[in-house]
Image (tube, rainbow, N blue to C red):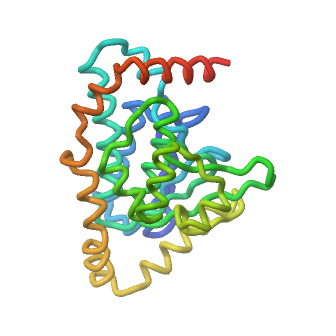
Amino acid sequence: MTPLIETQDIGAIRCLRLARPPVNALNPDLCRALIAALEHALADDVRGVVLAGSPKIFSAGLDVPYLMSLGDQRGALLEAWQAFFGAARRLGELRIPVVAAITGHAPAGGCVLALCCDYRIMACSEDPQRPFAIGLNETQVGLVVPEGIQMLMRRVVGEHRAERLLVAGEMVPDEHALAIGLVDELAGIDAVVPRAIAWLQALLALPHQPMLQTRAIARRAVVEALSPTYIQLEAFVDQWWEAGTQAALQGLLAKLKK
């Protein structure tokens, strides 16, 4: 079986590449594979992690066709969302630095994973008429963005801008994402992972324990945002079967089938 996470070590840095074609849709298997890969990195005493996607797509977010196939199986749906938020939480609480190498589009769950990382480097499209985009577009498909995920967005772009983006479910083009601080750097698509590695190498050249301890203090808000208190998973899953949500999701499913 082809691994869902491709692994490459560059010195003390491990690159984890999402590898579930065609769009790295986040089903429970991929989420659990990511959690396991992060655990293995810690066990192997890796000092930093790069999380990358495929060319032109980081991750398209949750696997909506899979979720819709579960029908009214509340337990299975809850398990799927637990796997996703578990992966996000593991990224957010990781005791070593992690860089998101956003190799293309990153809507919804893809954006959440990126927000959980220390630093975000995004591919800049060669075609200005067709930029890559990142954002939390949940309201466009009838979903409520949990408070904890809103906290992550507010942390990087500020309260008012986060409100505007979240309420509209806006996808932000690459250049604008840099301008508002949603991503930290832009790079050519082939340079995204090398830049992520270079950023980590510079960070890891600092006195190690002071850097890690300062980082842990600075990222307490990330860990708190991903706690069950602010995700409210049971309420989130209950909302899944609202008539408006189901209508919007069915519309998205029809688009995906074309």
Task: Give coordinates of residue 191: x percent, y percent.
Answer: 67, 63
User: Looking at the image, which is closer to me, 231 or 50?
Assistant: 231
Residue 203 to residue 133: above or below: below
* Residue drawn at x 44%, y 79% as measured from the top left: 203
* Residue drawn at x 37%, y 15% as measured from the top left: 70
Task: Give coordinates of residue 49: x percent, y percent.
Answer: 43, 61
Please tell me in which quadrant of the rendered image residue 102 appears: bottom right
Task: Give coordinates of residue 89: x percent, y percent.
Answer: 30, 50
Residue 61 to residue 222: above or below: above
Looking at the image, the residue that sits furthest to the left is 229
* Residue drawn at x 33%, y 29% as measured from the top left: 80
User: Looking at the image, which is closer to me, 71 or 87?
Assistant: 71
* Residue drawn at x 56%, y 20% as measured from the top left: 251
Residue 92 visible to the viewer: yes
Q: The C terminus is located in which quarter?
A: top right
Q: Along the horizontal axis of the image, is 232 left or right of 133?
A: left
